[in-house]
Image (cartoon, grey):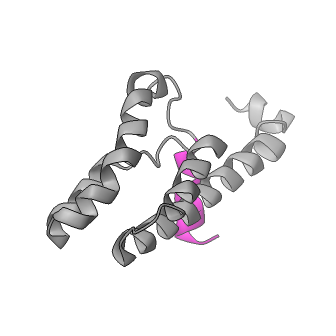
């Protein structure tokens, strides 16, 4: 299994209760990030994107928000590339969650070892 796939599966184990804390900030991220990529230098905008991206809260809803970001008019090529990377990571995380729910969580041997 590739390291990226392992990371995607591990990302699904992140506590879910933090989403309530940052829910409003997720919407703000999608409102502000296009402007940051238009007005900031590369290092600033890349750091902003890396540290504030809500990709650790993988969900179908979040995946939809990243896909909607690609449809916004006038977004920069750099933001398009970063957004596509985020979409790929989210898809892997969601697939990892599906594998976890379909196999590991249902396996009685796994539960017996806990």
Q: Which residue shows up at 56% across the image and 39% down it?
A: 13
Question: In the displayed structure, does residue 111 sit left or right of residue 7?
Answer: right
* Quarter of the view holding residue 80: bottom left
Side of 113 relative to 17 (left or right): right
Q: Is residue 88 left or right of residue 45?
A: right
Residue 22, compared with residue 109, is above or below; it is above
Please report the bounds of the magenta region as a residue range: 1-12
In the picture shown, does residue 24 fall above or below 79? above
Q: Is residue 8 magenta?
A: yes
Residue in the picture at 56% in, 55% down: 68
Residue 17 x %, y %: 50, 22
User: In the rendering, at what x and y percent does residue 55 appear?
Assistant: 47, 49
Residue drawn at the location 71% of the way across and 33% of the way down = 113
Asked whether residue 46 appears in the rendered view, the answer is no
Magenta highlight: main SS: helix
Residue 24 counted in the magenta span: no
Which residue is nearer to you in this view: 23 or 106?
23
The quadrant in which the N terminus is found is bottom right
């Amino acid at each position: 299994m590739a390291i990226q796939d392992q990371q995607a599966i591990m990302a699904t184990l992140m506590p879910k209760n933090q989403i309530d804390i940052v829910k409003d900030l997720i919407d703000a991220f999608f409102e502000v990030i296009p402007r940051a990529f238009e007005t900031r230098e590369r290092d600033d905008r890349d750091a902003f994107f890396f540290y504030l991206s809500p990709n650790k809260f993988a969900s179908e809803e979040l995946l939809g928000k990243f896909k909607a970001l690609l449809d916004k008019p006038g977004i920069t090529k750099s933001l398009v590339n970063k957004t596509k990377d985020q979409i790929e990571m989210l898809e892997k995380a969601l697939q990892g969650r599906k594998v976890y729910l379909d196999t590991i969580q249902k396996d009685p041997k796994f539960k017996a070892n806990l």
